[in-house]
Image (spheres, rainbow, N blue to C red):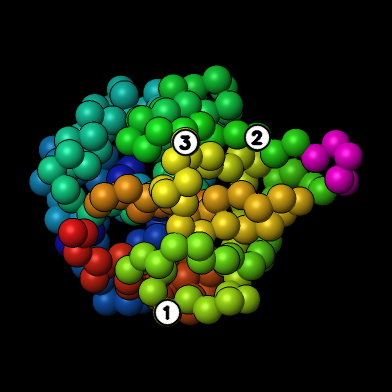
Amino acid sequence: MITIVDYNAGNLTSVKRALEHLGIANQISADPEVVRRSERIIFPGVGHARAAMEVLQTRGLDSALKEAFGRGTPILGICIGCQIILAHSEEGDTPGLNLIPGVCAHFQFQEKGLKVPHMGWNTVTVTQNHPVLAHLKPGDSFYFVHSYYPQPAEASHVFATCDYGFNFPVAIGVENLFALQFHAEKSGPLGLRVLENFARWTPC
């Protein structure tokens, strides 16, 4: 059973529908005890970093996620769930969960003329092999909607990048935690493959 963490962020039902399409048992829960006991966790969402952290803290979900991570529970972050696992976000000058050292930075494109948010399909380049990214090929594209992006402190924590004016990380991870800046649940068959990979992943 995969638990989808409910902290008033958007897009939870899209993740649930994608998992149901794959025949993967899942539940949406805002209960920290359910999160603590979960076999697997997906930490997705669309929203504002400060508001997200406030709800996580109010509900006790921040400590539940940290405890699950410490126990070795497989966790997948998606979009804002990729950003606030870092130590700090520039969005609202917000401390994050600090599960991976680093910051979440805002796109700055005054001279390049690129639009913010970065929205739509874009190519993802795998830079390190990982079971969650298994079977991806050069040129594979995924769906993005974001104005901020993850910047892990360690290059070894970056597993895939995307070019939008510059190469930035879009898949990061450490131990039993893996996270995606793109929306796997909105990325068609390739996104479903990534979710299925996560459901089968057994961290070392």
Identity of the residue drawn at 51% across and 66% down:
126
Local secondary structure at mark 1: loop
x and y percentages locating residue 41 in the rendered image? 25, 52
x and y percentages locating residue 186 in the rendered image? 52, 65
Q: Is residue 25 above or below residue 73?
A: below
- Location of residue 25 (image quadrant): bottom left
Local secondary structure at mark 3: loop
* Magenta-colored span: 109-113
Residue that numbered label 1 is attached to: 135
Query: In the rendered structure, which disc, 1 or 3, sits on the residue that comes first in sequence?
Result: 1
Identity of the residue drawn at 22% across and 29% down:
63
Does any portion of residue 140 appear in the rendered image? Answer: yes
Identity of the residue drawn at 86% across and 45% down:
112
Residue that numbered label 2 is attached to: 106
Q: Amino acid at mark 1?
A: His
Q: Amino acid at mark 3?
A: Ala
- Location of residue 162 (image quadrant): bottom right
Report whether 20 appears left or right of 116. left
Q: Amino acid at mark 2?
A: His
Residue that numbered label 3 is attached to: 153
Does any portion of residue 49 appear in the rendered image? Answer: no
* Gap in angstroms between the C-alphas marked 1 and 3: 27 Å
Q: Nearer the viewer, residue 125 or 149?
A: 125
